[in-house]
Amino acid sequence: MDRLQTPRLVLRPFAPGDAEIVHAIYSDPAVMRYVATGPISDLAVTERLLDDYSAHQDRHGYSFWAVFERESGTLIGDSGLYRTPSGEVELGYTLGAAWWGRGYATEAAGTWLTVAFDRLGITEVVALAEPANVASVHVLDKLGMRRDGERLAFGRPHAVFRASAPVELEEVRDLFR
């Protein structure tokens, strides 16, 4: 899998040349306010982050990918899945402020949930959002992810959201045979 397309977005693994463009997003304090790293001031750090995403892609077949607005062809952020050190598969997204409020985060993240369950065979996806990040909490609620308590992450409290793969009717029938 090397490309996903939605009605308004194209998602693909980050490629050489993307770092400088996405760095403008990753260095924006408003955009990165609720992101673990906070704003990234050094382009070399963004490059290392994208190298990590690429290595993760090679190991697992998924990672955080570049998100492009189809109409303009502009790289507007990232979205994807990432296996954490504890073994959870985490859903995430970061979009430049100019593209907030258009439903793009919901569209990209919803696509990744579908891919996780339908193509990758992942049975559970988690997402973390600081409660003050009302927009992100709204996205996760819209996607139907269920709240499952809180945890400390990156030194700050985060609401935990979970989504599980739909249970096939045949699997349910097998329980009662």
Image (spheres, rainbow, N blue to C red):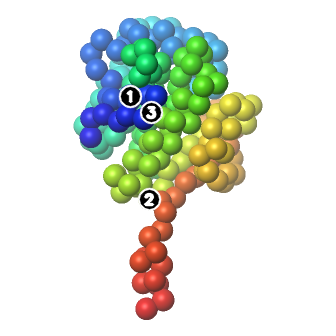
* Residue 16 screen position, x and y as percent: 27, 16
* Residue 163 screen position, x and y as percent: 55, 54
- Specify few, some or many for label 3: CA neighbours under 10 Å numbering under 14, 14-19, or 20 or more: few
Residue drawn at the location 45% of the way across and 8% of the way down: 42
Residue type at numbered disc 3: Pro
Query: In the image, which disc is placed on residue 7?
Result: 3
Nearer to us of marks 3 and 1 is 3
Query: Residues at badges 2 and 3 in contact (C-beta under 8 Å)?
Result: no
**Residue at the spot of label 1:** 10
Q: CA distance from mark 2 to mark 1?
A: 25 Å
Residue type at numbered disc 1: Val
Residue type at numbered disc 2: Thr
Query: In the image, which disc is placed on residue 131?
Result: none
* Residue 111 screen position, x and y as percent: 45, 41
Residue drawn at the location 56% of the way across and 36% of the way down: 106
Q: Earlier in the sequence, mark 2 or mark 3?
A: 3
Q: Is residue 23 at all visible to an observer of this figure?
A: yes
Residue drawn at the location 64% of the way across and 34% of the way down: 136
Query: Residues at badges 3 and 1 in contact (C-beta under 8 Å)?
Result: no
Q: Earlier in the sequence, mark 2 or mark 1?
A: 1
**Residue at the spot of label 2:** 123
Instruction: Provide the secondary structure element on which disc 3 rests.
Output: loop
* Whether residue 29 is situated above or below residue 80 in the rendered picture: above
